[in-house]
Image (tube, helix red, strand yellow):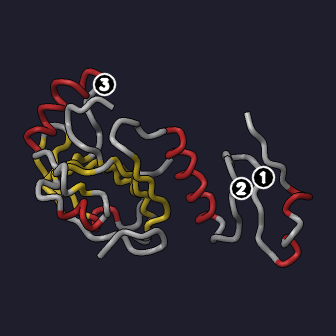
Amino acid sequence: MTARVGQKAPDFDLPSYQKGSFKHVKLSDYAGKWLLLYFYPGDFTFV
Amino acid sequence: MDVDVVSVSVDSYYVHKMWNDNELGQMVEGGIPYQMGADQNGQMGREYGVYNETAGVEQRGRFLIDPDGIIQSVEIIGNPVGQNVNENIRQIKAFQFIRENNGKVACPASWEPGQQTLTPRPGLVGNVWKQWKPTLD
Protein backbone atom coordinates (compact mmCIF):
# COMPACT_ATOMS: atom_id res chain seq x y z
CA MET A 1 0.00 0.00 0.00
CA THR A 2 1.26 3.45 -0.86
CA ALA A 3 0.14 6.69 0.73
CA ARG A 4 -1.96 8.88 -1.57
CA VAL A 5 -4.05 11.99 -0.95
CA GLY A 6 -7.73 11.04 -0.85
CA GLN A 7 -7.04 7.43 0.10
CA LYS A 8 -6.85 5.55 3.40
CA ALA A 9 -3.62 6.11 5.29
CA PRO A 10 -1.46 2.97 5.42
CA ASP A 11 -1.79 1.20 8.77
CA PHE A 12 1.13 1.34 11.19
CA ASP A 13 2.12 0.01 14.60
CA LEU A 14 5.43 1.24 16.00
CA PRO A 15 7.28 1.14 19.30
CA SER A 16 7.31 4.68 20.65
CA TYR A 17 8.44 7.01 23.39
CA GLN A 18 6.31 9.63 25.13
CA LYS A 19 6.88 11.52 28.36
CA GLY A 20 9.04 9.01 30.20
CA SER A 21 7.33 5.86 28.91
CA PHE A 22 8.03 3.31 26.19
CA LYS A 23 4.76 2.59 24.37
CA HIS A 24 3.25 1.47 21.07
CA VAL A 25 1.59 3.84 18.67
CA LYS A 26 -0.79 2.68 15.92
CA LEU A 27 -3.08 4.29 13.39
CA SER A 28 -6.24 2.90 15.03
CA ASP A 29 -5.39 4.88 18.21
CA TYR A 30 -6.44 7.95 16.22
CA ALA A 31 -9.69 6.72 14.67
CA GLY A 32 -12.18 9.60 14.80
CA LYS A 33 -9.42 12.18 15.31
CA TRP A 34 -7.30 14.43 13.14
CA LEU A 35 -3.69 13.24 13.02
CA LEU A 36 -0.55 14.98 11.80
CA LEU A 37 2.11 12.39 10.96
CA TYR A 38 5.57 13.82 10.75
CA PHE A 39 8.57 11.92 9.34
CA TYR A 40 12.08 13.33 9.73
CA PRO A 41 15.61 12.16 8.93
CA GLY A 42 16.88 11.57 12.43
CA ASP A 43 17.07 12.50 16.09
CA PHE A 44 19.78 15.06 16.89
CA THR A 45 19.79 16.41 13.35
CA PHE A 46 19.64 20.14 13.20
CA VAL A 47 16.54 21.43 11.42
CA MET B 1 -7.21 23.20 17.28
CA ASP B 2 -8.07 19.55 17.66
CA VAL B 3 -5.25 17.50 16.18
CA ASP B 4 -2.88 14.83 17.49
CA VAL B 5 0.73 14.54 16.37
CA VAL B 6 2.93 11.47 15.88
CA SER B 7 6.55 11.87 14.82
CA VAL B 8 8.44 9.05 13.09
CA SER B 9 12.11 8.39 12.35
CA VAL B 10 14.31 5.31 12.06
CA ASP B 11 15.80 6.00 15.51
CA SER B 12 15.03 3.59 18.33
CA TYR B 13 12.87 4.72 21.22
CA TYR B 14 16.00 4.75 23.34
CA VAL B 15 17.43 7.47 21.11
CA HIS B 16 14.06 9.26 21.11
CA LYS B 17 14.26 9.31 24.91
CA MET B 18 17.81 10.68 24.90
CA TRP B 19 16.93 13.36 22.34
CA ASN B 20 13.84 14.38 24.29
CA ASP B 21 15.60 14.37 27.65
CA ASN B 22 18.84 16.06 26.59
CA GLU B 23 17.91 18.47 23.83
CA LEU B 24 14.22 18.87 22.96
CA GLY B 25 13.26 19.09 26.62
CA GLN B 26 15.44 22.20 26.78
CA MET B 27 13.35 23.80 24.00
CA VAL B 28 9.88 22.55 24.95
CA GLU B 29 8.92 22.86 28.58
CA GLY B 30 7.96 19.47 29.98
CA GLY B 31 9.39 17.65 26.95
CA ILE B 32 7.75 16.50 23.74
CA PRO B 33 4.03 15.93 24.41
CA TYR B 34 3.33 13.57 21.50
CA GLN B 35 4.30 9.99 20.64
CA MET B 36 7.70 9.59 18.95
CA GLY B 37 7.50 6.45 16.79
CA ALA B 38 10.49 4.21 16.02
CA ASP B 39 10.38 2.89 12.42
CA GLN B 40 13.73 1.12 12.67
CA ASN B 41 13.39 -1.05 9.57
CA GLY B 42 11.85 1.77 7.49
CA GLN B 43 8.76 -0.32 6.68
CA MET B 44 6.27 2.40 7.59
CA GLY B 45 8.38 4.98 5.76
CA ARG B 46 8.28 2.81 2.60
CA GLU B 47 4.49 2.60 2.73
CA TYR B 48 4.31 6.38 3.06
CA GLY B 49 6.86 6.91 0.26
CA VAL B 50 9.38 8.74 2.44
CA TYR B 51 12.03 6.08 3.12
CA ASN B 52 15.34 6.83 1.41
CA GLU B 53 16.88 3.41 0.71
CA THR B 54 20.33 4.87 -0.05
CA ALA B 55 20.63 6.95 3.10
CA GLY B 56 18.63 4.58 5.31
CA VAL B 57 16.54 7.41 6.75
CA GLU B 58 13.12 8.97 6.23
CA GLN B 59 12.70 12.09 4.13
CA ARG B 60 11.10 15.01 5.91
CA GLY B 61 7.40 14.39 5.28
CA ARG B 62 4.13 15.58 6.73
CA PHE B 63 0.77 13.80 6.31
CA LEU B 64 -2.56 15.14 7.53
CA ILE B 65 -5.04 12.31 8.19
CA ASP B 66 -8.74 13.04 8.81
CA PRO B 67 -11.02 11.32 11.38
CA ASP B 68 -12.00 8.71 8.74
CA GLY B 69 -8.35 7.76 8.22
CA ILE B 70 -8.17 9.47 4.81
CA ILE B 71 -5.00 11.40 3.87
CA GLN B 72 -5.96 15.01 3.10
CA SER B 73 -2.57 16.66 2.66
CA VAL B 74 1.04 15.62 2.04
CA GLU B 75 4.30 17.55 1.96
CA ILE B 76 7.68 15.88 1.41
CA ILE B 77 10.74 18.13 1.35
CA GLY B 78 14.51 17.79 1.24
CA ASN B 79 16.47 17.34 4.45
CA PRO B 80 18.09 20.76 5.01
CA VAL B 81 14.87 22.79 5.11
CA GLY B 82 12.39 22.57 7.96
CA GLN B 83 8.61 22.56 7.76
CA ASN B 84 6.55 25.73 7.96
CA VAL B 85 4.55 25.04 11.10
CA ASN B 86 2.23 27.99 10.44
CA GLU B 87 1.39 26.56 7.04
CA ASN B 88 0.66 23.17 8.58
CA ILE B 89 -1.69 24.85 11.08
CA ARG B 90 -3.37 26.83 8.29
CA GLN B 91 -4.05 23.66 6.33
CA ILE B 92 -5.37 21.81 9.37
CA LYS B 93 -7.79 24.67 10.10
CA ALA B 94 -8.88 24.78 6.46
CA PHE B 95 -9.53 21.03 6.21
CA GLN B 96 -11.35 21.04 9.55
CA PHE B 97 -13.50 23.98 8.40
CA ILE B 98 -14.38 22.15 5.19
CA ARG B 99 -15.31 19.00 7.11
CA GLU B 100 -17.49 20.99 9.55
CA ASN B 101 -19.31 22.30 6.47
CA ASN B 102 -19.79 18.82 5.02
CA GLY B 103 -17.41 19.49 2.16
CA LYS B 104 -19.74 22.10 0.65
CA VAL B 105 -17.20 24.97 0.77
CA ALA B 106 -13.73 25.47 -0.66
CA CYS B 107 -10.89 27.53 0.83
CA PRO B 108 -9.10 29.57 -1.86
CA ALA B 109 -5.33 30.22 -2.00
CA SER B 110 -3.78 31.51 1.24
CA TRP B 111 -7.13 31.21 3.04
CA GLU B 112 -7.07 31.92 6.75
CA PRO B 113 -9.90 31.31 9.23
CA GLY B 114 -12.51 34.08 9.02
CA GLN B 115 -11.74 34.84 5.40
CA GLN B 116 -14.04 34.30 2.48
CA THR B 117 -14.72 30.78 1.23
CA LEU B 118 -16.19 29.73 -2.07
CA THR B 119 -19.20 27.49 -2.55
CA PRO B 120 -18.74 25.46 -5.73
CA ARG B 121 -21.88 25.51 -7.88
CA PRO B 122 -22.67 25.91 -11.60
CA GLY B 123 -23.16 29.69 -11.32
CA LEU B 124 -19.65 30.14 -9.95
CA VAL B 125 -18.00 28.70 -13.05
CA GLY B 126 -16.11 31.51 -14.75
CA ASN B 127 -17.26 33.97 -12.07
CA VAL B 128 -14.75 33.41 -9.28
CA TRP B 129 -13.06 36.70 -10.26
CA LYS B 130 -16.22 38.61 -9.29
CA GLN B 131 -16.19 37.18 -5.76
CA TRP B 132 -12.60 36.65 -4.82
CA LYS B 133 -9.36 38.50 -5.49
CA PRO B 134 -5.97 36.98 -4.73
CA THR B 135 -3.82 38.98 -2.32
CA LEU B 136 -0.06 38.89 -1.91
CA ASP B 137 1.82 40.41 1.01
Residue at image point 15% right, 39% down = B16
Query: Can you identify the residue that label 1 sits on?
Result: B116
- From the viewer's side, name the closer residue of A45 and B27: A45
Q: Position of residue B27 (x, y in %)?
A: 31, 23
Label 3 Cα neighbours within 10 Å, binned few <14 / some 14-19 / many ≥20: few
Q: Which mark is residue B108?
A: 2
Spatial separation of the CA atoms under disc 1 and disc 2: 8 Å
Query: Can you identify the residue that label 3 sits on?
Result: B29
Residue furthest to the top in view is B26
Residue at image point 84% right, 72% down = B125
Q: Position of residue A28 (x, y in %)?
A: 28, 68
Residue A18, above or below B103: above
Check contact, mark 1 vs mark 2: CB within 8 A.
Answer: yes
Q: Position of residue B91 (x, y in %)?
A: 55, 51
The image quarter in which residue A10 lies: bottom left
Q: Chain of mark 3?
A: B
Q: Secondary structure at mark 1?
A: loop
Residue furthest to the left in view is B14
- Among the two numbered marks 2 and 3 on one chain, the one whose residue lies closer to the N terminus: 3
Q: Chain of mark 2?
A: B
Q: Identify the amino acid type marked 3.
A: Glu
- From the viewer's side, name the closer residue of B3 and B110: B110
Check contact, mark 2 vs mark 3: CB within 8 A.
Answer: no
- From the viewer's side, name the closer residue of B107 and B61: B61
Residue B38, above or below B82: below
- Among the two numbered marks 1 and 2 on one chain, the one whose residue lies closer to the N terminus: 2
Q: Quadrant of the C terminus of chain B?
A: top right
Spatial separation of the CA atoms under disc 3 and disc 1: 37 Å
Residue furthest to the right in view is B130
Label 1 Cα neighbours within 10 Å, binned few <14 / some 14-19 / many ≥20: some
Q: Chain of mark 1?
A: B
Q: Nearer the viewer, mark 2 or mark 3?
A: 2
